[in-house]
Amino acid sequence: PRRTMDHQPKFFENLSGTGKAIGVLTSGGDAQGMNAAVRAVVRMGIYVKAKVYFVYEGYQGMVDGGDNIVEVSWESVSSILQVGGTVIGSARCKAFRTREGRLQAAYNLVQRGITNLCVIGGDGSLTGANLFREEWSGLLEELAQKGKIDEEAVKKYAYLNIVGMVGSIDNDFCGTDMTIGTDSALHRIIEVVDAIMTTAQSHQRTFVLEVMGRHCGYLALVSALACGADWVFIPEYPPEEGWEDSMCVKLSENRARKKRLNIIIVAEGAIDCHNKPITSEKVKDLVVQRLGFDTRVTILGHVQRGGTPSAFDRILASRMGVEAVLALLEATPDTPACVVSLSGNQAVRLPLMECVQMTQEVQKAMDEGRFVEAVRLRGRSFENNLNTYKLLSHKRPDAELPKTNFNVAVLNVGAPAAGMNAAVRAAVRVGITEGHKMFAIIDGFEGFARGKIKEISWGDVGGWTGQGGSILGTKRTLPAKYLEKIADQMRTNNINALMVIGGFEAYLGLLELSAAREKYDEFCVPMVMVPATVSNNVPGSDFSIGADTALNTITDTCDRIKQSASGTKRRVFIIETMGGYCGYLANMGALAAGADAAYIFEEQFDIRELQANVEHLTEKMKTSIQRGLVLRNENSNENYTTDFIYQLYSEEGKGVFDCRKNVLGHMQQGGAPSPFDRNFGTKISAKAMQWISKKLKETYRKGKVFANTDDSVCLLGMRRRNLVFQPVAELKNETDFVHRIPKEQWWLKLRPLMKILAKYKTSYDVSDSGQLEHVTMHSPKEAETGAI
């Protein structure tokens, strides 16, 4: 919602929590990232001068009272950001399901003046919270009648505010694109699949993997998409009659094509179209009986709930936690209980019961066999995943493929980024499905000029999703100095469209090629760019492929470094991150690792600020948290270098703390791509390919392709909630070419979050949050532009 002129921006400094008490609890199954949410609620609550209480062991602790409900301090939530599960415990609670239990819980809360609850859990926990809220005034009346509380208290604590956050690895909650814990669970699954791939290849084995998801197939679907599984079974989309035959045909075809391994993923709640369960054992027996393949079953089980939360989950949970406190501060007796969630890249508030009803609708649709509707009710992100999976996993026989006679070339440009290969695979396979002949260009524009170009087939890109770096090879060279030669190659190979996967150089390259159209007709073809760079500095997109993997590398390293400080007390680490002039990695890394400060180019800092940071750390060393973490983007300031800051801190901190520095360097560009990058790369690239097909049809006249308008050279980016194609010519005005960054960057809005969570006084514009939205059924059309 855009602000109109008469609305003043709203700042959180003007919202006070004085006199309010907030209780925070985790309930239901645990999920990685719950602790990050608890930490954010506690710190934001204390920051706005409210009292914050832990409720231990979920609703059980609320019913039992006593030591289970304790007021907490800032330091209580130190060092929990990187811990999986929930440190305040979660329990299934029978007592809270009875009115008697809820009466006791209400009494325990009123004793402490708690009328604001932040509940982190699944749909069951949130439904329970809503019932509690509806009964609240009745429960207080009853307590007053029994003489347990006085009339004064009934008036003073007249209503209960509830804000929920969804913590569930299944991602089974409607209205939110990602629930806390889902991304981390995908990390666990993908780690296992990557490990199994190597052993399966050695023995030509088939592996059946069972993943969690009793009622929701999200984990199975996305992990199948991210590792290119041969077959996936999910509850929302049961296989057609006779699936046994088609699956076996597909597996044996793959073997005939020299593919050494088969991976089949089964959600624990998978069913066939008669609502009968499909178990991993059943699938294994089938493969063994029909094909005689050496087959093994691996059930991942609770591994998926364990381990440290991913960078994505930490940032998600921290954003949600802060948003939850804002929602509680703004709640009135009339606002319904809400959940804070993420839609695309934006924090939103939704009425809790609307989400719960929608979530129950899905289950109902599945029970009644209305599977198409179940998929639609799950939301556009789920539908998008399913459509992409169907597109990429099954190759249609050559005879059935359309023949367009178009040649489309794919290349990587710029520095390597994890996820590039997933993007190339998706482009090649979608292109072949659309009937084009696909060509791969080796070594970027330089290789193009030298004629390093070859046709690439469906099978050539098998197994590429999990590979880091760039298999095609990538170079930073721009096309301007090779225009003549590149035009020759375009002509010789009769290339009718170009897809460029890369970073800022790819963007500059497309600008150069489109400028060269006046001189060379060869460049009058549709061209599209898919952003892939760890720096996330490409204009026109909130995210770029590879940034999530780099962020996880930074976060993991910071975790280790923080741990190394636990032995030696009072130590401050200064860590330099990549990113060119773009502070995305430093800023988001700081948020995910719980750093004290992050120096970035976008927010100028001077010696006074450095001084203030040193003093802040000196104060911090007097508390029980005796270590500091400071991130610095490599180009944040040419004079205040990492060495300079290290020396300044060492001098100023003498006698109080000592200093160490660490330059993370190229490890940020390497490594296997994270689930997010595999998935994002796959989906965004498939969509770009479909755009190319559409443009080719539009621009084909009299036996040749001719495209010379601005809208035939586009960049596909994720903007807030949608995937959008933007002409590169229009993005020029949004770009700072000297520093190679967009002029406006969405994540700078999250900058105050890091400062708040590190106890700095700061201003925070919260004008965007606050409106309650409604859960809407999306139209099938919308699924195409949908979130990742």
Image: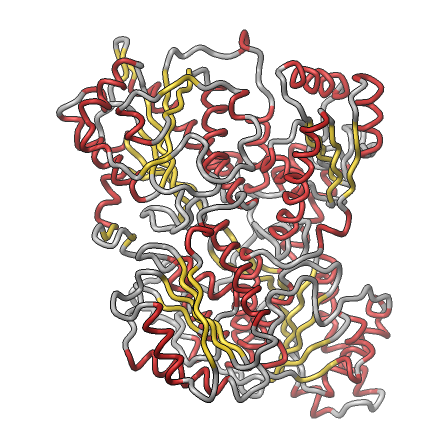
Residue 122 higher or lower than 506, as above or below: below
Pinpoint residue 260: horizontal percent, then vertical percent.
66, 23
Q: Nearer the viewer, residue 214 or 19?
A: 214
Pinpoint residue 423: horizontal percent, then vertical percent.
46, 34
Residue 170, visible in the rendered structure: yes
Residue 738 higher or lower than 709, as above or below: below
Q: Is residue 418 left or right of residue 272?
A: left
**Residue 492, picture quadrant:** top left
Residue 175 higher or lower than 103, as above or below: above
Residue 370, visible in the rendered structure: no
Q: Nearer the viewer, residue 464 or 382?
A: 464
Q: Residue at x 63, y 80 (%)?
A: 76
Pinpoint residue 331: horizontal percent, then vertical percent.
55, 73
Pinpoint residue 232: horizontal percent, then vertical percent.
69, 32
Q: Is residue 384 left or right of residue 701?
A: right
Q: Nearer the viewer, residue 18 or 157?
A: 18
Residue 288 higher or lower than 653, as above or below: above
Display coloring: secondary structure
Q: Residue at x 36, y 20 (%)?
A: 453
Q: Nearer the viewer, residue 598 or 271?
A: 598
Quadrant into which the N terminus falls = bottom left
Q: Is residue 110 left or right of residue 116?
A: right
